[in-house]
Image (tube, helix red, strand yellow):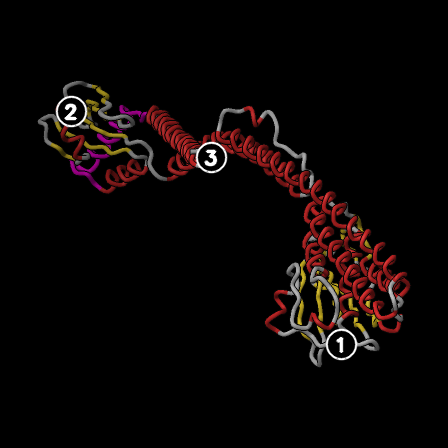
Amino acid sequence: MQAEAPRVGVRHGVGHLYWRLLLWFCLANVVTLVVSIGITRQLERQFSARQADWQALAARAADLYTETDGRPGEAFNAWRKQLRERQIAVGLIDADGQVRAWPPRSVIEQRQALSEHPFVVLHPRPGITQAGVAVTGPDGRLWHFVGIQYPPRGGVFRWLAVGIEILVSLLVIGIVGGWVARSIGHPVGQVQDAARRFARGELGARVGPPLVERNSELGQLGRDFDDMAERIQSLLERQRGVLQDVSHELRSPLTRLGLTLELARADAGAKAQPALDRAEREIGRLDRAIGEVLELSRMEVQLPGASRERLDFARLVAERTRDMVDREGIRDSRWSRVLEDGLVVMGNPVLLGRAIDNLLGNAVKYSAAESVVDIRASRADGRIWLEIADHGPGVPAAELASLFRPFYRGTNAARAAGSGLGLAIVARIVAAHDGTCAARNREGGGLCVRVELPAA
């Protein structure tokens, strides 16, 4: 039952958030549609309110029609064409009700209503105006002028209407969408910031109020993150305690074994000395293996939060090679260094120094005593790379991908003592610095390990 409850809660939360976003989206579109239609209709009414001077048009129609002896001549037709460009159509009906100059069909259907009064204006539909005017021509004949005015179409009005609809759409959707995006984006940003700080090693990073106090899916997300972070922090703190206990419980017996071995050596005869020497070597090997295991575990806990600074990487490599000369008694002539200037990285000098030590030690361990270890450091495509290559036996191609696994020892491991953790520690340090590790066999024999780090 406990395993099912979170899953049901997540489904409900996602569904609720989905429907809420869908509702706001639909509401924004409905508001946009209603406002756009309202504004367009208002514009149509304003344009329609600019009614033509029907009496003047009626007099002009009678004059032009009379000039052509009762026929719609060229002047009359040209004038009607000009009116059609203004969305106005006109016609004439004589006193007997006969149509002389054909108006639109919709006006013909209304001609009785339009000719019953000397002057009448009808609005059969919004934006459309029909007019009827009784007018006397220059020859004394009575005419009934009929006309219709449509709302403006195309041209400026069309583009104005489209522009207003786009503007209203952007305004409404921008307001609603901005509010929705802020109400979701800000809480998500809080969780993201807390997650990034936690990933950098700030184990105390939490989302905290006011987000976790909200009774919503995002509030639940913040509470879930804080609960997760609390448990991880507790586990890591317990792990630190276990590491300290392991260090004490394992190192103390080894120390006592070493003392006991020294006491036994003093009382043992010459025949027992080789066995005692071997036991001492095995104790030393076990002590180093325990130290590397503890160090790897400690790095798994502490590396993400390690402090970083701008480092001259070439200088750090040179310092570590000189230190190995002084500490391990390795001749400086064994190093062949090609280090470019200006190689700057953001990193922890202690950790990167340890990684370089492990790479150098590994190269020396698997090389002949007089062979040279090639060290090259350079920069390319915004990355700084370090290659350390030996002239040893190399590694079978099938084993190259496993070299950076903890405790892995290949078929050539019998050539030198070790626990299989050196390159694993290197890989962990490099990964913590956003870098990569790779190994390949050199042409002519030997192993080359390549480390790439982002340039600062």
Foreground: 67 or 243? Answer: 243
* Residue matched to label 1: 391
Q: Amino acid at mark 1?
A: His
Which residue occupies the extreme bottom position in the image?
Answer: 444
Q: Does 64 lie within the magenta span?
A: yes
Q: Nearer the viewer, mark 3 or mark 2?
A: 3
Decide if residue 425 is on the left or right side of residue 148. right
The residue sitting at 61% across, 36% down in the picture is: 229
Which secondary structure lies at badge 3? helix
Question: Which residues, given as a range, are shown in magenta?
Answer: 51-73
Q: CA distance from mark 3 to mark 2?
A: 56 Å
Earlier residue among tags 3 and 2: 2
Decide if residue 292 is on the left or right side of residue 410. right
Foreground: 358 or 93? Answer: 358
Earlier residue among tags 1 and 2: 2
Q: Does 452 lie within the magenta span?
A: no
Earlier residue among tags 3 and 1: 3
Q: Is residue 98 above or below residue 363?
A: above
Decide if residue 86 is on the left or right side of residue 235. left
* Residue matched to label 2: 142
Foreground: 124 or 202? Answer: 202
Q: Amino acid at mark 2?
A: Leu
Residue 43: numbered disc: none
The reply to whether callout 1 and callout 2 are in contact (CB within 8 Å) is: no
* Residue matched to label 3: 170
- x and y, in percent, of residue 381 in the image: 69, 62
- x and y, in percent, of residue 408 in the image: 65, 63
The reply to whether callout 3 and callout 2 are in contact (CB within 8 Å) is: no
- x and y, in percent, of residue 433 in the image: 71, 52
Q: Is residue 263 visible?
A: yes
